[in-house]
Amino acid sequence: MDELLTLEEVAKRYRIAPATLRWWRTRGRGEGPKSARIGRRVMYRRSDCDAWVQSCFDAQATRDAS
């Protein structure tokens, strides 16, 4: 099973303000990494976070190539 991270752990790992992660989650536009509510906590799979970071780099490379 993939490691689960809390919102605070994701914020610290990727140097993103916790409020920004909450904002992205509430907007529901897929701006941040995939997350799920498990009990009372919002959790993130490490692999989803890594995939999200990679997609950010891929999108930037596409914009730079245009």
Image (cartoon, rainbow, N blue to C red):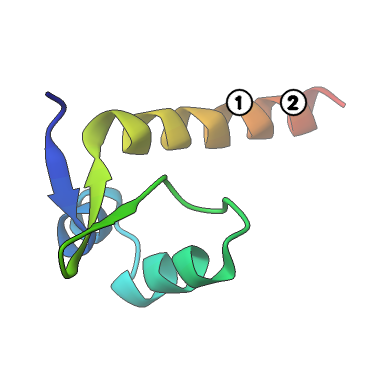
- Tell me which amino acid carries mark 1: Asp
Horizontally, is 53 left or right of 15 in the view?
right
Which residue, given by chain and number where applicable, does mark 2 sit on?
62
Horizontally, is 55 left or right of 10 in the view?
right
Rendered-image quadrant of the C terminus: top right
Q: Residue 38: percent from the left, percent from the top?
A: 19, 56
Q: Is residue 11 above or below residue 58?
A: below
Per the rendering, the mark at residue 58 is 1
Q: Residue at x 43, y 36 (%)?
A: 53
Q: Residue at x 23, y 35 (%)?
A: 46
Q: Closer to the camera, 7 or 62? A: 7
Quadrant housing residue 55 = top right
Rendered-image quadrant of the N terminus: top left
Q: Residue 32: percent from the left, percent from the top?
A: 48, 52
* Mark 2 residue crowding within 10 angstroms, few (<14) / some (14–19) / many (20+): few
Q: Is residue 60 above or below residue 1?
A: below
Q: Residue at x 21, y 49 (%)?
A: 13
* Mark 1 residue crowding within 10 angstroms, few (<14) / some (14–19) / many (20+): few
Which secondary structure, mark 2? helix
Which secondary structure, mark 1? helix
Quadrant housing residue 60 = top right
Query: How many badges with numbers are in the image?
Result: 2
Q: Closer to the camera, 13 or 4? A: 4
The reply to whether callout 2 and callout 1 are in contact (CB within 8 Å) is yes
**Most extreme residue toward the bottom, as rendered?**
19
- Tell me which amino acid carries mark 2: Thr
Q: Residue 39: percent from the left, percent from the top?
A: 15, 63
